[in-house]
Image (cartoon, helix red, strand yellow):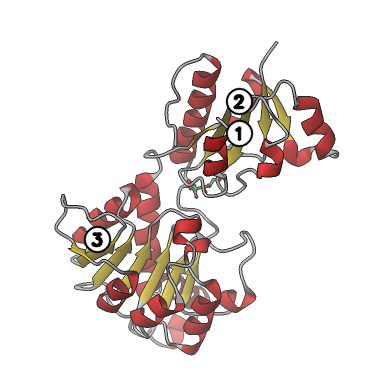
Amino acid sequence: MKPDVLLIGPFFEPKQRELENLYTCHRYWQAPDKPAMLASLVDRCEVIVTSGGRGVEVEIMQVLPRLKLVACFAVGVDAVDVEWCRAHGVAVSNTPEVLTEDVADMALALLLATVRRIPFGDRFVRDGRWLQGAMPLTSSLQGKRIGILGLGRIGGAIARRCVGFNTEIGYHDPRRNDGVDYAFFDDPVRLATWADVLIAACPGGSATQGVVSREVLTALGSQGVFVNIARGSVVDQEALVELLSSGALGRAGLDVFNDEPRVPAALIALENVVLQPHQASATVPTRTAMGQIVLDNVAAYFAGKPLVTPV
Ligand code: 8YV
């Protein structure tokens, strides 16, 4: 008898298939009668697997008294109530490190695409407008001040790349890092006032909800660039759209949004933004490695061994 696993939503298909070969997986998102599926698992489901975007509701976890592990296909576990899990003896695992470099690459890709107007230039060539004259000049990244919000693994990898682009680096983080010589700012508004570019690289969740506030975006200013590869929740999205529309904020490169995959029409209409559909970790090698970590954590749990990457 293979152990049961409740799969809340789909994840990287080849690794999901491996999981489904090893365990009796119950596809929650496809269940026509979800309460009936949960009821059938009450006395036997010890493991939930879910993606970062989907997470899992407390209402689901609390009907599974034997639940012991929520294995998350993501580094960010803000869609899982980790406090609730802790209080109820449920471990949570994530997929750190393997995605750091790809996510940092996306931050730089969005930054360059935004500052140098790469999508605009691409359309300019395709639409035949080059034949009528040269594309307008863009601003430059050279010598700019980059403010990084959250100097964890991903923020650190972004900073290392920014050094190679001849920029100056500052950061705000709850913890000052004495191992680096980037300028530290004890407050996001002060960081944004100093910076030409603000990159959000902090975790999502209640602690960072709206940390990129209207005040922060206003401080970044009409020539400022905002890049978000963190979570939509870290920014006041309404203020972001408003300030980009009025020109009070210069440009933005966004991989993440509130209420994905829905992106406000007002944002889509803007020419001064570059948009991505939450793609930062979405490469085949990284998603393969993330999926393997999910499998390793589930295997460790059923083997009675310590989890590979507990949160
Ligand atoms: C994934 C992510 O896109 O790891 C994270 O926290 O945001 C991404 O890698 C997503 O969570 C996969 O479901």
> In the figure, residue 277 lies in which quadrant?
bottom right
On the image, the x and y values in percent for residue 217 come to 41, 77
Q: Is residue 35 above or below residue 277?
A: above
Name the mark on residue 162: 3
In primary-sequence order, the first of circles 1 and 3 is: 1
Q: Quadrant of the N terminus?
A: top right
Disc 1 beta carbon < 8 A from ligand 1? no
- Callout 1 amino acid: Val
- Callout 3 amino acid: Cys
Q: Residue furthest top?
A: 1
Question: For the residue carrying disc 2, how many other residues have a C-alpha within 10 Å: few (<14), some (14-19), or many (20+)?
Answer: many
Question: For the residue carrying disc 3, how many other residues have a C-alpha within 10 Å: few (<14), some (14-19), or many (20+)?
Answer: many
1 and 2 marks in contact (CB < 8 Å)? yes
Name the mark on residue 19: 2
In primary-sequence order, the first of circles 2 and 3 is: 2
Q: Secondary structure at mark 1?
A: strand
Work out how far the residue at label 1 is from the one at label 3, CA to CA, in angstroms. Answer: 35 Å
* Residue drawn at x 69%, y 24% as measured from the top left: 45
Work out how far the residue at label 2 is from the one at label 3, CA to CA, in angstroms. Answer: 38 Å
On the image, the x and y values in percent for residue 173 come to 30, 58
Write down the residue under mark 1.
Answer: 49
**Camera-side mark, 1 or 3:** 1
Question: Of 123 and 99, which appears nearest the observer?
Answer: 99
Q: Secondary structure at mark 3?
A: helix
In primary-sequence order, the first of circles 1 and 2 is: 2
Q: Is residue 116 visible?
A: no
On the image, the x and y values in percent for residue 285 come to 44, 37
